[in-house]
């Protein structure tokens, strides 16, 4: 799947990904009431409105943005009705040709990880029938449990043409508490996690030199990002932290190689809440999202240059 | 919530927890067909049968077992219909007076972690209405992102009387790849994670001396478990790995203090699939589950002794 993503990035000259972290709170006021003008007060109706919001954003950006990242926590908080919205959003975005990253950061022991892998990358068998649950293209995972918690995902990567991104250096302020501890051989924990990621991906390197096992590397930590780019030449980066979290194009350009490839940058609130930003005043939420995507693309291209020279 | 759990453990003299990792595959053959005798082939019907299976197990064990641990991966693989079964199971077990541990190993940056915390420990606001999503008593979390990914859970612990268990030393064979790396100060990564857990929990220590921020410590690693018990006198342990994964009562007794307190031991397949075990032949699945619970209780009491002396 990583080759398809890179091809779309080159074709659109846009290494970005829209984060659909759609809290009901983020919706415009007129979407917070139902068709009869009543204030919405159930998960079911809230989830329907979230789906509608996502669909309109997807329609407006799918020709200029290669991927969406759907953050499942924002759907889980609306119960199983929220998960229905998650499912619908994943399917709708794929139907529009976008690469869908399920941002779930799943992790467990092998037998349980294989359930997660079925849920997001493969299919689940019910008697003789195989059914897809939440059919994403790519999934984020947490590698704290080591290889046997990752192996089931690698199997689906190979059999179903999927990719994963393993948390290596996360974008949040306290990520260093664990990730930047120094080991007795002089390495940092995040560097060691990075080496495991390279090892896990080494049999799945595609035509652009990047493997199906990518790394999550926050835009907010440029020193570690530059270090990881050097250490992991075959690892593609999913880069959160741009915009609302404080990461800039100048900070994250170290994640890219000489061809302008090697990463995809996520922005969530900066896009889906753009309509609240005075810069896009007067626009409806989906037009504002598109305008914000174009501005982000320009900002990144100024820093990174042409992709796929 | 940890005090309530410990009280139930003392009252029942049983430091165990039934893991409802209910794969549809585990169900008896007569539950794999619908009421008309047709082979079940949809998530909806599969999830209904899983719920029925869980309810019958809960009915049969709720007077002798203090808690259930519901492993969400096994529900996610059946899509949002599976999550409906998860929700129903959580509510049913709580209704029967059991302490419910949602085993979700959630983790993310602060703003996103707060969505997970609402989903499992708190409530989600839709306009002016607060609604509960998957109302568990306790939640497992992964601490790789550090303090700001844990903080939202701590807030719900305090406001809603809940508990969490943070992964410290997991039960799987490859857990050492990250967790047993040695730091430059001589500590291991899992020890450092343990110290963070103690720090996160220090304001929530209850009347038995244990805090609301517990640790997941695998029964399969007795050396690390003994070490952690010594280092973390105020941290309660959730102990997976007994039975199917190879952990024994003798291996895990190091997790308990002199009063026979300090941990709760999970068994999943050993209980819910007991009906397939020749030892319980002729019993239906729920009677076999109860018999396996009683055997497990005896096995643990022989090793640990009386709880709450």
Image (cartoon, coloured by chain):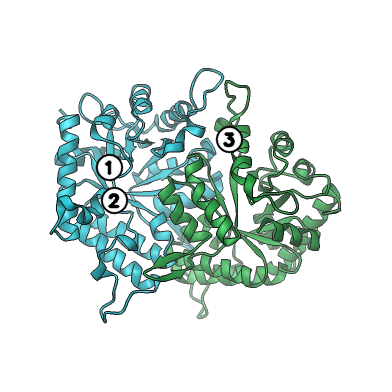
Chain colours: A cyan, B green
Which mark is drawn over residue A267? none
Report in which chain the residue with disc 1 lies. Answer: A
Q: Would you say the residues marked 3 and 1 are in contact, meaning their CB atoms lie under 8 Å apart?
A: no
Q: Are marks 1 and 2 in contact (CB under 8 Å)?
A: yes
- Residue B39 seen by the camera: yes
Read off the residue under disc 3: B174
Q: Please tell me which residue lies in front, A65 or A95.
A: A65
Distance from the alpha carbon under mark 3 to that under mark 2: 37 Å
- Which one is closest to the eye, mark 3 or mark 1? 1
- Residue A220 sits in which quadrant? top left
Q: Tag 3, which chain?
A: B
Return the x and y of residue B233 as percentages of the image width and height: 73, 41
Q: Are marks 3 and 1 on the same chain?
A: no
In the rendered structure, the answer to whether residue A242 lies left or right of residue B29 reads left
Quarter occupied by the C terminus of chain A: top left
Instruction: Out of A111 and B228, give the one closest to the viewer.
Output: B228
Residue A62 in sight in this render: no
Q: Secondary structure at mark 2?
A: helix
Q: Estimate the x, y position of residue A139 in percent, counting from the top left.
A: 38, 46
Quarter of the figure with residue B90: bottom right
Q: Which mark is residue A269?
A: 2
User: Could you say where residue B96 lies in the image, as x and y percent from the top left?
Assistant: 66, 72
B263 lies left or right of A170: right
- As drawn, B254 above or below A100: above
Residue at the image point whose x is 35% and y is 28% from the top: A225
- Tag 1 residue: A243
Instruction: Answer few, some or many: residues within 10 Å of disc 3's Cα (few below 14, many 20 plus, some between 14 and 19).
Output: some
- Circles 3 and 2: CB distance less than 8 Å? no
Q: Residue furthest left?
A: A282
Q: Earlier in the sequence, mark 1 or mark 2?
A: 1
């Amino acid at each position: 799947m990583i080759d398809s993503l890179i091809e779309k990035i080159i074709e659109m000259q846009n290494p970005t990904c829209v984060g659909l972290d759609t809290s009901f709170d983020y919706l415009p006021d007129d979407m917070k009431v139902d068709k009869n003008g009543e204030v919405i007060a159930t998960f079911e109706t809230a989830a329907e409105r979230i789906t509608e919001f996502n669909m309109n954003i997807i329609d407006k950006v799918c020709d200029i943005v290669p991927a969406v990242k759907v953050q499942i926590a924002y759907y889980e908080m609306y119960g199983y009705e929220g998960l229905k919205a998650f499912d619908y959003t994943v399917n709708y975005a794929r139907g529009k040709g976008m690469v869908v990253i399920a941002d779930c950061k799943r992790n467990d022991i092998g037998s349980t990880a294989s359930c997660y892998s079925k849920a997001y990358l493969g299919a689940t068998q019910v008697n003789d029938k195989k059914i897809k649950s939440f059919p994403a293209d790519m999934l984020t995972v947490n590698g704290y449990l080591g290889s046997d918690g990752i192996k089931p995902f690698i199997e689906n990567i190979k059999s179903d043409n999927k990719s994963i991104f393993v948390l290596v250096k996360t974008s949040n302020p306290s990520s260093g508490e664990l990730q930047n501890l120094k080991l007795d051989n002089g390495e940092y924990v995040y560097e060691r996690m990075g080496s495991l990621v390279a090892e896990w991906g080494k049999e799945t390197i595609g035509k652009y030199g990047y493997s199906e096992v990518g790394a999550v590397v926050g835009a907010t930590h440029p020193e570690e990002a530059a270090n990881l780019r050097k250490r992991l030449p075959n690892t593609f980066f999913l880069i959160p932290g741009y915009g609302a979290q404080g990461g800039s194009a100048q900070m994250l350009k170290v994640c890219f190689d000489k061809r302008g490839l090697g990463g995809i940058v996520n922005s969530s609130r900066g896009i889906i809440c753009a309509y609240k930003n005075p810069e896009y005043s007067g626009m409806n939420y989906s037009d504002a999202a598109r305008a914000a995507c174009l501005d982000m693309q320009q900002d990144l291209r100024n820093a990174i240059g042409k992709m796929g020279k």
